[in-house]
Structure formats: structure tokens, C-alpha cells
Amino acid sequence: MIIVGIESSCDETSCSIVKNGCEDIATTINTQIDIHKLYGGVVPEIASRLHLENITLVIDETLKKANMSVSDVDAIAVTYSPGLLGSLLVGLESAKALSLVYNKPLIKVNHMLGHIVANNIGHTLEYPLISLIISGGHTDLILMEDEKSFKYIGSTLDDAVGECFDKVARILDMPYPGGPNVEKLALSGKDTYPMPDILSDDEYNFSFSGIKTAVINLNHNKPGINKADLAVSFEKTVAEILVNHIEEAVKITNINKIVLAGGVSANTYIRKSFDDFAIEKNLNIYYPELKLCTDNGAMIASAGYYEFI
Ligand code: AMP
Ligand code: MG
């Protein structure tokens, strides 16, 4: 079964063609990062206008790469929520138009479910599992009994992890998106600065704004602070918080399959922390391929496949 997946919820316009929910035949991702960078973050109005300019080009390019026409596919899957309203509309209306013109079923896909199912491309997911979505807009702990069940068990009470990386990068004078820059800077530092111990007694919910404030205060109050060291202390604390929460969730639910998803799951230090934890506790841990960590059409096509069958 061949599904087209269309994604436009934030600042990536993407289209993929995926076979049987697991084989990525062709993917095109057009990222708007270079433009939003000028403003220090995603500007919704600009994002939706750029999606509008790019959507047909991205769909055409993907069909060309796969050597297919829309008439060759079985269904069209598209992100319907959550995301920026104007951006979502561009993908949704394009998918609806294709569905009408080619008389193909239209499948709506929840973007967050898509992030988790991105792990299906390359290896088959087994259920039940606990998923941790760590992205620019979300920090969600989700329990999935099977492909379609989707239960939120925890979330951030303030900033999302990726948002926190972006703000810390800004404090340390590095451009958006901050995560990869903080990671790079941290490579040349050592863990030096104390970070607050936040919400360590709440098993499921997260809080990151206190750590962000700690970074701001340290940076203001200590002239000549070593920024690389500060980046390490920050990254290490974030990784510890994430791993500790998963440890609690595993204890309570007795589920031993963990799936990471979202842009922050590209972070090597965080991946390594989860790898060490998984070895120590004898758990299975999955991450998406690096290019499928950020928003893409393949994850939407894959989630759409399960919805469709
Ligand atoms: P998403 O919201 O899933 O599209 O992912 C974008 C978010 O992931 C942004 O907040 C980025 O700063 C963050 N991010 C991307 N790569 C990394 C990385 N290597 N380390 C930490 N955060 C990252
Ligand atoms: Mg996303």
C-alpha cells in the first residue's frame, strides 16, 4: 500500500511517499529555517506564506523522485493538528484538493502521533510502549497500548525542551534553532555550574523554565563565565530530567519499550544518556533516523497507513 504524506504544521514543508507504513520511497523536506533565523524564531504569518509558495513544488519533486503520479497511490495522509493554524491549512487544503481531483481517500494524522510512528521507518515498533516527544513546541510523555491508542500521561508545565534549548542559545549569543548550536558548544566544555533541582518529585510532568532562568542568572551575574561549561551543565541537567522521568514511567507502567521522537531527540548527548540507561535497565530504546527527527512527510504517511488499514 502506497501512501502520500503531507506535512506543513510549522516551518517545514514536506511530502513523502511511503510503502506499507515502513519503506520511505521518496521524501522532500523544504525547511524555512534560514528565513525565520532572521527573527530569532518561527514567525507564523511568514511560515504560512512560504508553505503556500512551496507546497506544490515539494509535492511535484517527491512524485518525480518516486517516478509516480498521484493516481498510483492508495491514499493521501496529511497533518491536521497540532500546529500553526495558517501553516496547517496550506497542507490540509492541498491534500484535500489532491484527494478530490484523483478520487483518493484522505486520512487525517495527528502530528504528535506522526513523530512517534517515524520510528516505524527502518524498524518495526512493538507495543505497548512509552514515548517521549521532545521538540520545539512539545515535551510529552505518551503511553501507547497499540498503533492507535494514544494516551498523554505527562507534559511540560512551562517551556518545551527544544524551546528551552533555543532560549539558552539566544542567551549565549547563538542563532536559532539553538539546539544544535548548544550541543556543538557543549563539546568543548565541562560540567561546572550548579542547576536547580526542579519537580523531581513529579513522576510525569516536566518543568524547564527554572533551568532556563538559572542559565540567564549565571550568565548575567558571572562576568567572563565559561559559556561552553554552561552549555554542558545545562544539557546534562536536561538529559538527567528526561531520563529520570522515563525511569519513573517505566517503574509505574512496567513497560520496557521506549521511543524518543521530535527535534531534540537528534541530540547526541541525550541519545547517549538514554542508551546508557537502557543498557543498565535492560530496556529497548528507539530513536528515529536523524533526518526523521524533525518534521517530515514520511512520519505522516506512516501514521496514515495504520489509520487507513
Ligand atoms: P521540532 O520542533 O521537532 O521541529 O524540532 C525543532 C527543535 O529541536 C528546536 O527547538 C531545536 O533547537 C531542537 N533541536 C534540533 N536539534 C537539536 C539538538 N541536536 N540538540 C538539542 N535540540 C535540538
Ligand atoms: Mg514537530
Image: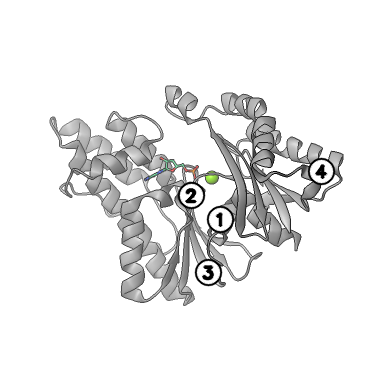
The residue located at (36%, 57%) in the rendering is: 271
Q: Are marks 1 and 4 in contact (CB under 8 Å)?
A: no
Mark 2: C-beta under 8 Å from nearest atom of ligand 1:
yes
Residue 170 placement: quadrant: top left
Q: Is residue 201 visible?
A: no
Q: Earlier in the sequence, mark 3 or mark 2?
A: 3
The amino acid sitting under disc 3 is Leu
Badge 1 or badge 4: first in the primary sequence:
4
Q: Secondary structure at mark 3?
A: strand
Q: What numbered label is drawn on residue 118? A: 1
* Mark 2 crowdedness (10 Å alpha carbons): few <14, some 14-19, many ≥20: many
User: Which label sits in the foreground, 1 or 3?
Assistant: 1
Find disc 4 in the rendering and name its residue.
99
Quadrant occupied by the N terminus:
bottom right
How many numbered tags mark residues here? 4
CA separation in Å, label 3 and label 2: 18 Å
Quadrant assignment, res 148: bottom right
Measured as percent of width and height from the top left, residue 295 is found at 54, 44
Mark 3 Cα-neighbour bin, 10 Å: few <14, some 14–19, many ≥20? many
Q: Nearer the viewer, residue 81 or 22?
A: 22
Q: Position of residue 263 (x, y in %)?
A: 46, 46
Q: Which residue is mark 2?
A: 293
